[in-house]
Amino acid sequence: MPVGFLTNDGLNIYVADDGSYHFTFYERGKLGFDRVGNLDDVLYWYCEGVVTRAAAKYVGDRAERFKYEYQVLSHINPDWAKRSVRETAARFRNGQPEDIALLPDIGEPL
């Protein structure tokens, strides 16, 4: 995937003129999302997406899938692994709070 080359279909990672890092996705010319952050954020978003897709492909049980994602991200960056669990818990609180119990223990309340 080329970095810095903007397309109107697919994933884009680039640095804007103001120095902010963007992680965006376009489908058929329509913006799906545009996440703005620092370099660590962009690296996290990219790696988290790769790990999540791999987990969905290879691990059937949801609790085991979340555990797999946590373990793989922990090997890359332990802070990213915890961040992923926290963000997933936040999404679950907005619709399916019972699923928080499926998430791995990260040593802090979710």
Image (spheres, rainbow, N blue to C red):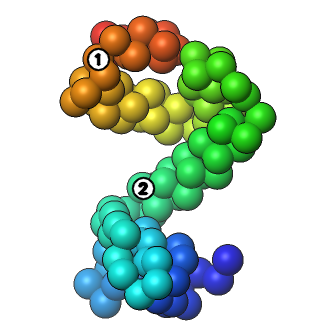
Residue where numbered disc 2 is placed? 41
Q: Is residue 27 visible?
A: yes
What residue sits 53% from the left and 73% below the top? 11
Quadrant in which residue 10 is drawn: bottom right
The 10 Å Cα crowd at callout 2, few under 14, some 14 to 19, many 20 or more, is some
**Image x and y of residue 55, in percent:** 68, 36
Image coordinates of residue 61 in percent, x first then y, are 65, 19
In-front residue for pair 37/50: 50
**Crowd band around label 1 with a 10 angstrom C-alpha radius: few (<14), some (14–19), many (20+):** few
- Amino acid of disc 1: Pro
- The residue shown at (66%, 38%) is 56
Q: Secondary structure at mark 2?
A: helix
**Is residue 108 found left or right of 79 in the rendered image?**
left
- Residue 32 pos. (x, y %): 37, 69
Image vertical order of residue 70 relative to residue 36, above or below? above
- Ranked by sequence position, the earlier of labels 1 and 2 is 2
